[in-house]
Each structure stands twice: as structure tokens, then as C-alpha cells.
Amino acid sequence: MAQPAASSVGSPANTTKAFDGDYGSANAKNVTPGCPNYLTAPFGLVIRNGFAQFQGGTGLTFQGYVNPQGALAMVSQSGPTFQGQIDPNFVLNGHAAGPNCTYDLTWHRITPFTY
């Protein structure tokens, strides 16, 4: 999977609170034949002050920033990555990828944060 252009990646200096909230109703699909189905349990994603985080079924924690256009790039502590996009209806679609497996993931914002 290609890495996003540097200008599209969120960072503490390139983020927004516009997408903040609790995201649930997760849907995960294993797209690599023969890979374990680690993502069967429901799991949520939280975005606060533009910083996103979720814990996958393997115990890996993914973290990263949403940019003002809704693009989200996250990394885990051991290398797997997530690349996604939040649409105007606050639905996040993306892919988590490790060295051998890829998963399609979707979340819906269920609770926006108010400040």
C-alpha cells in the first residue's frame, strides 16, 4: 500500500477537532486469504483534539492524527499501519495493514465531543 503524501498526514500542527468523537459500529473484513480474523470483536475508535486511537483484536494500539480534510494515518507500536478517510457523514473507511495481512475497516461516529 502506498504511503500518503506528507502534506496529507495529520500531525499536532495539522489537525482539527471537527471529527472528534466516539466512533463505533465497527465493521472489519479480512481481505487477505489465510490471515487470522483478529478483528471479530467490536472495537471502538476515539478521536479527541484531532488525535485518533483504537486497539485492535491483537492488542495492538493504533494512533495518529486526522488532518483537516478528514484523512487519518495511524501506526501501531510494532509496525502495522492504518490509512483511512472520514466522509461528511462522519463514517471512517480505511485499511489496516501489516507485513502479511490487510483488513478493511469502517466506523461510524456515534457521539461527537463538545468543547
Image (cartoon, helix red, strand yellow):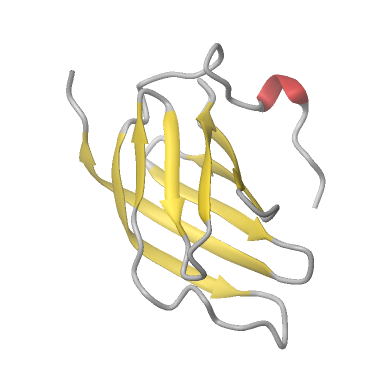
Q: Horizontal placement of 4 versus 96: left or right? A: right
Q: In which quarter of the image is the C terminus?
A: top left
Q: Which residue is drawn at 78% across and 71% down?
A: 100
Compared to residue 42, the image places residue 97 above or below, namely: above
Could you tell me residue 58's position as x and y percent?
52, 70
Residue lying farthest right? 2
Residue lying farthest top? 13
Front-most of 19 and 78? 78
How many discs appear? 0
Could you tell me residue 69's position as x and y percent?
53, 24
Could you tell me residue 8's position as x and y percent?
67, 25
Could you tell me residue 50's position as x and y percent?
42, 26
Compared to residue 13, the image places residue 10 above or below, namely: below
Q: Quadrant of residue 21?
A: top left
Q: Which residue is drawn at 36% across and 23% down?
A: 49
Q: Residue at x 75, y 35 (%)?
A: 4
Q: Residue at x 49, y 69 (%)?
A: 28
Compared to residue 14, the image places residue 33 above or below, namely: below
Q: Quadrant of residue 73?
A: top right
Q: Horizontal placement of 71 versus 115: left or right? A: right
Compared to residue 68, the image places residue 41 above or below, namely: below
Q: Horizontal placement of 112 versus 63: left or right? A: left
Residue lying farthest bottom? 34
Front-most of 19 and 77? 77
